[in-house]
Structure formats: C-alpha cells, structure tokens
Amino acid sequence: MGRWRRASQIVNRLRYDRLFGSPRDSIRGYPAIPLTDIGAQLRREREIVYGSLSGFRLVGGGGTWRTTIRSFGSLASKVARDPSFAKITAEDINYFRKILGVKNVIQDEDRLIASNTDWMRKYKGSSQLLLQPSSTEEVIINVGLLNNITSLDKVSGILVCEAGCILENLDSFLSDHGLMMPLDLGAKGSCQIGGNISTNAGGLRFVRYGSLRGSVLGIEAVLANGSILDLLGTLRKDNTGYDLKQLFIGIEGSLGIVTKVSIMTPARLPSTNLAFLACKDYKSCQKLLYEAKCRLGEILSAFEFLDSESMNMVITYLEGVRNPFPSSDYNFYVLIETTGSTESHDKEKLESFLMKSMEGGLISDGVVAQDMNQTSSFWRIREGISEALVRAGAVYKYDLSLPVEKIYEIVEEMRSRLGQSATVLGYGHLGDGNLHLNVSVPEYDDKVSAKIEPFVYEWTSKHRGSISAEHGLGQMKANEIHYSKPVEAVQLMASIKKLLDPNGIMNPYKVLPQSVLC
C-alpha cells in the first residue's frame, strides 16, 4: 500500500480529463461516448496516457481522458490548463518505470499521436506518456487490464466483474449460462462496462430492460483522494441510507472512477425475431410504435428508426451493406425486435401485428429476418451509421431526448437552416424518445457550426428535452447544461463535486461549467 500512496501523490498533482468519442459523443465502437470502433482506435482504448501538458488520460473503461484541442474549420482552440497543477518530470517517469516496468511506460511518438486523436477527429490531445498498469495499487486505477469476472449467481442472475471487461465478452460469458447483459450497443466489441456505467449508456434494448440505474446493484470506485469506496453490494433491496452508487452512474468519472460493478442480468430467451420495415412518413413511425407496444407487449425488445439519409449514408460508405428494399426508396425505416420464450407464440404475435399494420397503411414494405445472417445484416445497417458518417468526412453529433412527436421536427428544421451546405441525418431509439441528430460535412466549418449551435440546444430546451440522452455532456456540452437543468440543480451538482473532488482533478472541464466550480 505504500507504493500506492506514493503513486497517488504524483498522479493527484495532475489534472484528469476525458473525451468521449461516441461514442463518447460517439457511438459504435462506444463509448462512450460508449467508445467507438474504426480500426486501430479499438486497440487504443485500453491504455493510459500520462502527459506533461495534458495531464492524466485514461482510454478505456468507457472514456478517453485528456486535455484536448477542438478543431472546427481551420482553427483550433486550446483548452486553458490550470497552472496550479504540476507537469510531468523525469523523476515521475523513472518512478512509474519502477512500478510498471519499462515496457509499460511508453513514450513512442507514433503511438502517442495515434492515442491522442479521437475517432471523430474533432479533438487532439497532447499527452506525452502512456502508462499500462495491471492493478489498482500501481496507478490509481486500471481500466483495460481490470477485465476479470469475479462471480456469477446463476439463480439470481447477479454478475460481479471488473470495470475493464468488454461488454461483448461479458455477454458471451453469460450466454453459456442462459443469461445476457441488459444493454446492447453498437460498440459492444470495444466498450467496457465501467465506461457504460460512467456514461449510463442506453443502447438498443433500453425499451425492454431499462436504464443501468436500475440494473446496477453496486459499484467499487476510486475517489479523488485515492481511497477506494466499496459499494459492491449484490442485494436487489437495500434501503439503508443514501443510494450512493447512483452518484457514479452517468457522471463521466467526474466524481470517481468505477473499478468494479455488480449488475442484474436477465435470462437469455430462446426466441428472437427481427423485422425491417419501411414507412412513408414519421407519423407512421409514431403510430407503429404505439401499436407495437399494445400488440407485442411483453416480447417487444427493440424499436429503432432511421431516415432515408441515414440509409443512403450506410449504403454509400460501408462495403457489403445492402438496402433490404433495393427497388424502392422510402422516407423512413424501422427495426422491431421481439424476444420471448416460445417461438410459435412470438411469431404468431409478430405476424399478426405486421399484417394489421400493413393493412392500416402504417407499413409500406417489410421483411422478417429468416436466419442469423439476415439478422446481422439488418442490424449492421442501424449500427453502421456512425461508422459511415466518419468515413464520409466531418460530423457534428447530437444526442437528444425529446417527446416522440417532436423528434423529427428538429431534423427538418436543421435541414432548412443548413440547406445544401450539409447533410442532416436523424436516427435513433424511437422507443426511448432518443434522437441521434447528425450533421455531415466534408470538413469542420465555423460557419456551419454557428448555424447549429446554440440553436440545437435552444430548440431542445424549448420543447423540454435533454441535450444529452445517453452520451454524456463531456467537454463539448459542459457549458450547455443549463439548457436541461435549472440553476439550483447545477449548483447542487457543483457542491457535490467540490465535496468529493475539492482539487478538481477528476475529469476536469467536463460535465459542469468551470464558472460554477470556481
């Protein structure tokens, strides 16, 4: 424990910050944002970067921590670093080499360039040292290397694991025991459960299994003073005092870093069906959602939508992806998934629902996946949109919660504002009222940015929505929190932050405006 304290003294002198590439504001490949995927980026998300200018950066566990330069157009505005924090020295480097070994203290310039660039190419860090620890005693936390499963109660379905476990790996492990993770993301192959919790990731099956705030039973977290807070309970009912674990869900590591988690996992039911449907207008999508909830009831597990621009983006930029309706163009597409225990019963309910919806004019065309290959190809369309956007060029991403009837209005208004200067896409989790609004441009442009912000936040606030549904505020939206939260709530958040992190070393510049923390 002595070396833990010594390492903590060095690290606590430096600032931490984080960028969610989804992810963070990202998704596919998160994270978280979600973190996202794109080639080598997946391999970078499990490292720790410790830099002289950028402070301490964590990649993996759902986020990338760094001081960043944000580029819109040709100019980059550098985040002002608090001068009260120390810079890394040769003494620090030698100290970490003694703890981690030379091979786990990386200064290679090419490696650093790759790790300092986020997947959307909007942020560039200046970290100068990578650390790869293997235990919490070495450097405050370990994310990517904390990837062990501690226990599984097969009867209750309660899983206890470390924060660095990859979501897809956990789901595969649970599959062998007839269970599944309660969330599913496009980034499941790279995002980590600690990051999912830190961003309160929603995902594709939120409509069935709800929020992580309900699924997570306990956490272990490292606090700003280096202490480890053990809240790793496995009880579904525990009403003794404040539910402190909730302070670490969805707060993006700004109060502490999640290192372990206990989580409820539902049964993996044997019958799954997926329908890919075409609709003539957004009103039909809304009515279809209502009918799905009424007629499919307990077996409805996902309800996703995308517009024609999203479909065109995927078809154009992702190799091997095909439109299920190649001979026709439709304005909207919907994916409906059902999950149940009896295949014949579930198919009968789905077929009856589809027939009545077709007769009622809600569905213009549709196809039900007949095997796993078709199922994967359908999901690839929906999950591949973010990847396609990155391949197309620069992208402005917004993750909004709105009343379902208002969701597509902002997409149409944004198209009117931007005209031919950008391609505006709308897709997301319609069953949850969550829109992913994306503006695709050849390169970042300050003129385009000025037309988007603050309009997008003002419009969302006017319609009593949230400017961050599931991706978090991060650095990009920290100063915009007032659009979704009243002054009193932000002040209370700042009080909690000052109490748990008085020196402001945990993920600075994120979540809350600096003005309320001074």
Image (spheres, rainbow, N blue to C red):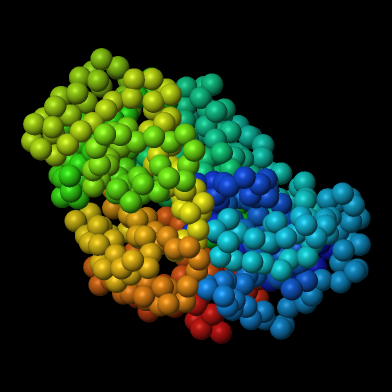
Q: Which residue is found at the position 64% from the left and 35% from the top?
A: 150
Q: In the rendered view, does 138 fall on the left or right side of 198?
A: right
Q: Can you tell which quarter of the image residue 58 is in?
A: bottom right
Q: Is residue 379 visible?
A: no
Q: Can you tell which quarter of the image residue 350 is in?
A: top left
Q: Is residue 91 visible?
A: yes
Residue 53 horizontal/vertical position (percent): 74, 73
**Image quadrant containing the C terminus:** bottom right
Would you place residue 336 above or below residue 106 in this image? above
Residue 415 horizontal/vertical position (percent): 29, 65
Residue 483 horizontal/vertical position (percent): 35, 73
Using the image as rendered, state which of residue 103 and residue 498 is in the foreground.
Answer: 103
Q: Which residue is found at the position 51% from the left and 83% from the top?
A: 515
Residue at the limit of the structure toward the top, as seen here: 344
Q: Which residue is found at the position 8% from the left and 31% from the top?
A: 359
Q: Can you tell which quarter of the image residue 405 is in?
A: bottom left
Residue 431 horizontal/vertical position (percent): 28, 45
Using the image as rendered, state which of residue 17 and residue 321 is in the foreground.
Answer: 321
**Image quadrant containing the N terminus:** bottom right
Q: In the rendered view, does 419 fall on the left or right side of 351?
A: right
Would you place residue 449 above or below residue 49 in this image? below
Q: In the rendered view, does 27 fall on the left or right side of 463?
A: right
Residue at the limit of the structure toward the left, as seen here: 360
